[in-house]
Amino acid sequence: MSVPNYHQVSTISAGLRCACPRCGRGKLYDGLLSVAAKCSECELDYGRFDSHDGPAFFIIVVWSAVVLPLAVWLEFALEPPIWVHMLIWVPVVLVGAIALMRPLKAWMIAQQYRHQVYDNV
């Protein structure tokens, strides 16, 4: 039985589409942030890959560097009450972090596949 030859999928493309890092067609996730057991197209075992806390760390650093200056600007420009800040920034932080988590986690898993960095399973 011959092994199929897969073209090299861009890690950025696989990350943005949350797709399989090997074939680029199968779904990586089985839910919001739960990685599926294997690819539905090429049957790549996703159990070997784990992004650990890397995506969360980068999101905290990058997203806070975007949101914090905006919150400070709003405070100095308009001096709104604290509830306005809570009404604006809590949803912005939560929605932004969740929206960034899926592609960043997928990109890190694609990087692990590309560079053959696997957990000891």
Image (spheres, helix red, strand yellow):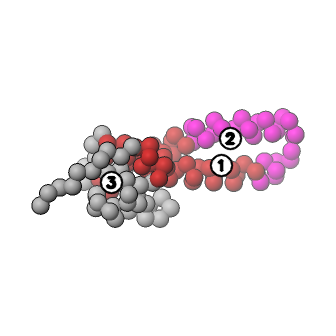
Q: Nearer the viewer, residue 71 or 106?
A: 106
Q: Of the residues shown, which amino acid type is indicated by label 1?
A: Val
Is residue 80 on the magenta stretch? Answer: yes
For the residues bearing labels 1 and 3, Cβ distance under 8 angstroms: no
Query: Position of 4 compared to 106: left or right?
Result: left
Judged from this view, the residue extending furthest toward the left is 1
Q: Which residue is mark 3?
A: 23
Q: Which mark is residue 47?
A: none
Q: Which residues are magenta?
A: 60-87
Of the numbered discs 1 and 3, the one sitting upstream in the chain is 3
Instruction: Give the side of residue 112 with respect to residue 66, left or right.
Output: left
- Residue 97 located within the stretch drawn in magenta: no
Q: Mark 1 touching mark 2, by CB under 8 A? A: yes
Rounded to the nearest angstrom, the CA distance separating label 3 from label 2 is 36 Å
Amino acid bearing label 2 = Val
Q: Secondary structure at mark 1?
A: helix
Q: Earlier in the sequence, mark 1 or mark 2?
A: 2
In three-dimensional space, the C-alpha distance between marks 1 and 2, rounded to whole angstroms, equals 7 Å
In this view, 113 is above or below 69: below
Q: Which residue is mark 2?
A: 67
Q: Which residue is mark 1?
A: 93
Q: Position of residue 4 (x, y in %)?
A: 21, 55
Residue 109 location, x and y as percent? Answer: 38, 48
- Name the residue rendered at 78%, 48% in the picture: 85
Q: Position of residue 38 (x, y in %)?
A: 32, 62
Residue lying at 58% horizontally and 38% vertically, measured from the top left = 62
Measuring from the top left, give residue 35's x and y in whole percent.
Answer: 40, 59
Compared across the picture, whether 61 is left or right of 107 comes to right
Q: Residue at x 48, y 58 (%)?
A: 33
Asked if disc 3 and disc 2 are in contact, CB closer than 8 Å, the reply is no
Amino acid type assigned to the residue bearing label 3 in the image: Cys
Circle 2 SS class: helix
